[in-house]
Image (cartoon, rainbow, N blue to C red):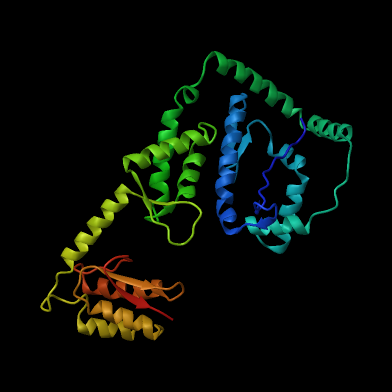
Amino acid sequence: MCSRTSGLAIFNMTERENGQTRALQERSLFQSQQYVTTVYRSELALRLHGLGYEIERGKHGQPEIKGYSQEYLDASSPRREQILGHLQEIGREGAGAAQVAAHRTLDSKELHSPDEVLKRHRELAAQFGHQADHVVAEARLNSRHHAQQPDKQTQQPEKTVQQSVTYSRNHVFERSAVQDERAILQAAIDRSMGQATYGQVRQEFEQRLKRGEFREVARTDGRAAPQYTTSEMVRMEKEIIARMQEGNRREFRDPMLVSSQLRIATEDRHPELSRSQLKAVDDIFVSREKIVGLDGVAGAGKTTTLAVIREGAEAQGPMSSATPSCCGHSHRAGR
């Protein structure tokens, strides 16, 4: 069995009405790269499963046909080993570094006739016990068995689709209340890889959108795909805002987060704080509100600031606490 590779090329160009060719903005294409890859892998896994092959996930989530030893796969992919070797030499890792390594180690290709290529692959297969023959024979047996007795995944794909979209909803909104449509569908497709089609996953998502489980958010940054939140996220945010408004109805006679003596002592122990960090710490220490937010640009030192706030709050006692919060009044920490 010859080693085969496949790929999809997308050109960022379009043709105008007058026949002239113009380039497209490439940002959206790069944003969609992982999404398109996931759709392609899912369809590939589904078709391989239909042919009777047993599929397992590779290191990076890619579908791989079960039954081949790692030694045989490594011997069949000398180009991959060449790229990995170069990455080890330069001490780099990651997809971006791998693409650079692929270009740097690219040699001029030798042209061989189909007969020569087939001969080499047969010799390699013989060295590793003709694994491809065994895999294909088992796939044919599985295919005939599936035709006579369809498995549960084939009979009830809707259950798999429902579970995958539910997983996606719970997973992608863990860190952000608003998510790109591609991220939602990508997580669902990856979850159901080899068991459901892209069309089935998208149909389930659109049905839930109509029911109000997902809610579209107005786009303001020129993104290519719609943005969504969920009804549960909206409910949680309303609840948080209500709690904040209720909890922040404080008066001057209510206690500050920490006492004056403890505030001064805590701030004196941290001369490393910048002026803006110290100002944020001081403002929060003297606050009488139950919920206070700390907002700052990347690299402003919010984590360091919160650590000092927590130190003072814990020293004050169980009546106070300091946690990263995204709502309430904001005290800005800048450089």
Instruction: Classify 2 as above or below 324.
Output: above
Q: Nearer the viewer, residue 160 or 24?
A: 24
Extreme residue toward the left, this view: 253
Q: How many marks?
A: 0
Measured from the top left, where is residue 31 in percent x and y? 55, 54
> Where's residue 78, x and y in %?
77, 46
Quadrant containing the C terminus in the rendered view? bottom left
Q: Quadrant of residue 321?
A: bottom left
Residue 23 % position (x, y):
66, 58
Q: Say if 243 sits above or below 161 in the image.
A: below
Q: Residue at x 61, y 35 (%)?
A: 44
Q: Residue at x 74, y 49 (%)?
A: 81
Taking 185 as reference, is 319 left or right? left
Q: Is residue 270 visible?
A: no
Give the quadrant of the N terminus. top right
Q: Is residue 147 above or below residue 284?
A: above
Q: Is 333 left, or right, of 314 in this rendering?
A: right
Where's residue 70, x and y in %? Answer: 69, 39
Identify the residue shown where x is 51% and y is 54%.
224
